[in-house]
Image (spheres, rainbow, N blue to C red):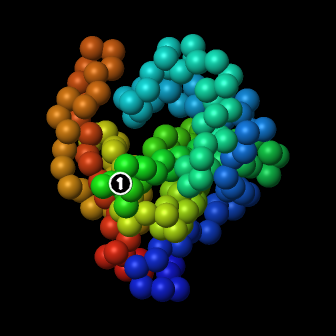
Amino acid sequence: MTSDQPGVVQSSPPAAGVRVRPLVEEDWVAFRALRLVALSDTPEAFGASHAEEAAQPDTFFRSSLSAEEPNRVFGAFSDSGDLVGIAGFRATFSAKSRHKGVLWGVYVVAGWRGDGVGRALVGAVIAHAARHVLVLQARVVTTNRAAHSLYARFGFAPYGIESKALYVNGQFYDEALLALDFTQATDA
């Protein structure tokens, strides 16, 4: 991660053989397919359920990708054009909290994990968020060591734990609440 200005974080270079870009409405079919895989593969990692989102109409996924700026979903594409990872940014629009945004929905296809795809996606979201908000928040299930390590490398700091945040298949999961404060960001 590099920075040309104090307090401004820029994205990491993409992983070899991967191109990261904002998804557009025309990407909705690939986005829907990968999002449903993510919700099925790691249900404890997301607040939404596979059943809930699988039942959504096509317009739900299209509108997720054509959302009002600065909201964005980023995709990582392989050289062959396959969508292999996703990560989203959602801004808060209320007057008293518009200085904050949320990193959400980070997922990388199993065969692409450990190759820097997650780093590139999170870096893209951070670079985008830094132009729009002062604080970027994230929630990570406490047992997901890889995600905690990744976010810590970018400077996210824990500010709390939500006990029993999710209830999946008869089991409770706690979530760590993390924040990256761009007003205090430094070079990593």
Residue at the bottom extreme of this rendering: 5
Q: Which of 186 and 111 is in front in this view?
A: 186
Q: Nearer the viewer, residue 91 or 12?
A: 91
| 57 or 125: nearer the viewer | 57
* Left or right of residue 175: residue 106: right
Residue 72 placement, left or right of 179: right
Rendered location of residue 136, percent (x, y): 39, 58
Q: Which residue lies furthest to the right in this view?
A: 80
**Amino acid of disc 1:** Ala
Q: Position of residue 108 (x, y in %)?
A: 56, 43
Q: In this view, does 52 lie above or below 118?
A: above
What residue is disc 1 on?
95
Q: In this view, does 168 lie above or below 81?
A: above
Q: Quadrant of the C terminus?
A: bottom left
Q: Can residue 155 be seen in this view?
A: no
- Quarter of the image for residue 12 reads bottom right
Q: How many marks?
A: 1
Q: In this view, does 58 lie above or below 99?
A: above
Secondary element at tag 1: loop
Q: Quadrant of residue 101?
A: bottom left
Image position, residue 1 (x, y; %): 50, 74
Residue at x 55%, y 49% (from the top left corner): 71
Task: Report the front residue among 121 and 145.
Answer: 121
Q: In which quarter of the image is residue 13?
A: bottom right
Q: Could you tell me if residue 164 is visible in this image?
A: yes
Residue drawn at point x = 69 percent, y = 46 percent: 23
